[in-house]
Amino acid sequence: MSTDSSTSPTASSDSPGDQGLALHHITVRFGGLLALDDVSLRVPPGRIVGIIGPNGAGKTTLFNVICGFVAPQSGAITLDGRPFRPRPHHLSGRGIARTLQGVGQFNGMTVLDNVLVGARSRKHEEEAWAALERCGVAEHAGALPASLPYAKRKRVELARALAAKPRILMLDEPAGGLDADEIRWLATLIQEAGCTVLLVEHHMDLVMSVCDEILVLDFGKPIALGTPGEIRNDEKVAEAYLGAAA
Amino acid sequence: MTVLKDRVTSRMVAPVMRRRLNPFLMVAVGAVLVVVLTYTLPPFRTYQLATIGAYLCVTAGLTVLTGLNGQLSLGHGALMATGAYTLALWQNKFNLLAVGIVVAILVTTVAGLVIGLAAARLRGPYLAGLTLAVAVVVPSVASTFDETFNSDQGLSVILNPPPESMTVEQWQAWLCWGGALVTTLVLALVTRGRFGRDMRAVRDDETAAKLAGISIARTQVWTFVISAACAGLGGALFAVLAQSVSPGAFPLTLSLFLVMAIVIGGLGRLTGAVIGAFLLVALPAVAHEIGEASGSQRLEGNLALTFFGVVLVVVMLAAPGGLASLRLPRSWRARLSRKPAHRAGS
């Protein structure tokens, strides 16, 4: 991810030939609420980019814009330098996979079928089994997701996303409800994902340990952008999380 | 990968997979059973068997639509009427039954496409409302355009006599069950593949399904079209059975009975569709016999509906997944699963 950081995190210096995903001055309003205010972000291939902020900062809205669930009032998205008008069911074909907050699962289908839904290529069975193995849930392939513990269900959802062999993996609060061991496993998985990862997460240790760069949102506005070390020492970020007294 | 898959398949997946019956084998067994029954049952029972076959075409399509894709249709009686009237018009003009059945399916498919396109934009009670309106409108269209559809008297269906080697009832049963078995085979194959998974994914979580690359609208429309085609075939077979079609044969209650039948049988299961089709014939027949025994025509008229209501409540209390979800008691299953092990060990 890179920006023209001379002024603010919103100012990006995009050029048409850039590889990867780029958001240009995205603004979203829900009635009178400004959910995203002139957010720009460039995510080069292979980077792990975290998006953090207090509750209601606009993190998931930003994901929804990238996925086409929410249309921005202004701004544009480019993928590999070309204009990208996202539609949710076309994302998979463009190499973008996303997990949802909580667990978005197909409870009437077995774990294997859940993952097969995500694998859309001709070798879908192989890819599904590989993803199940990678996420450590292959032995539950014949079970219904609802019969598994929460952490395993999260893994099934991750497996479905990975089965699509994405080049951009969007994870929306993947650590929510997981214990320390599961979060360590998740950190390893993200680092070894082998693709671009966009991570929305409240678990700071996870974000700081796996991300190359982090964008911080507060009330829809980007307030900081940088490496984990820079973000850790950023006064605006501390203020957003801890209040003005900090 | 293959090693892992094999290991896991043998340990965990196999019990699930084993429960899936081979559809070709089931259809072959069904065909043999129907042939045997048509030579052993008396003519009226053979006619009832044929009626079950015709109903099965409709219930199988409806259970896929409602049970696997989550679209509630209260208008399948109207789609049956579309198929039946198309066949009647065709037969009265050309008298080519095989082609007529195909034409009936095609016309109903087009009707299903139109309804499906609208239905894909609606959810829950609004979708049910739309299909309910179709169920009300289609029979009244037949009543209104009396020059074409002969109003409430309906149309008779010209049919060639069956081959000399068999009775009319046998021929009807073979025809209806031929259609039913082809329908169930096609639906079994469709629902086991990728499209079947897509249907279930759309039913379970539309947002997650979209993110997995599934077009919700396309999946819903195609499912509706498939289900409509099945209803069209069922309607055409009914026209063959009754040798006439009239608006009174496809009332709103028929659509409600169809939904109740697939719920009682087991929503989303083709076995449930078979049970539902059987109940659609058996319950009114039992009601008829009780009504006759009591000597009250009024009772006879309402008893079938009462029967369905009571059976629905009882089945939902005892087996919420429908009759097809009933399993043998655990002790029986354990005994059955132990037997092969003993044999293997000895």
Image (cartoon, rainbow, N blue to C red):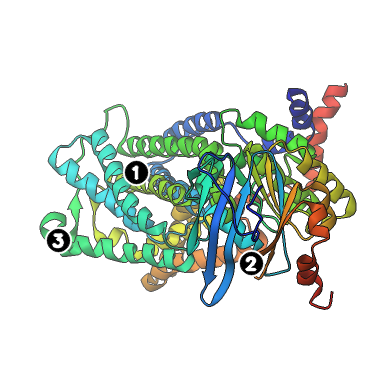
Q: Amino acid at mark 2?
A: Lys
Q: Amino acid at mark 3?
A: Phe
Q: Residues within 10 Å of mark 2 (few under 14, many from 20)?
A: many
**Relative to residue B87, is residue B78 depicted above or below?**
below
Asked whether the beta carbons under mark 1 and mark 2 sit within 8 Å of each other, the answer is: no
Q: Which residue is mark 1?
A: B233
Q: Secondary structure at mark 1?
A: helix
Which quarter of the figure has residue B6?
top right
Q: Residue A145's x, y, as percent?
A: 72, 49
Q: Quadrant of the C terminus of chain A?
A: bottom right
User: Could you tell me which residue is drawn at 59 percent across and 41 percent down?
Assistant: A20
Labels 3, 1: one chain: yes
Give the residue number, with chain letter if any, for mark 2. Answer: A221
The type of residue carrying mark 1 is Leu
Viewer-closest of B70 and A76: A76
> How many numbered marks are there?
3
| Side of A133 where B218 appears, left or right | left
Please, what secondary structure does the residue beneath circle 3 have?
Answer: loop
**Image mark 2: chain:** A
Q: CA distance from mark 2 to mark 3?
A: 64 Å
Distance from disc 3 to disc 1, alpha carbons, whole Å, reads: 23 Å
Pointer 3 residue: B145
Query: Quick one: A138 or A30, which is closer to the camera?
Result: A30
Residue B52 position in % (x across, y down): 43, 46
Do callouts 1 and 2 point to residues on the same chain? no
Residue A65: quarter of image: bottom right
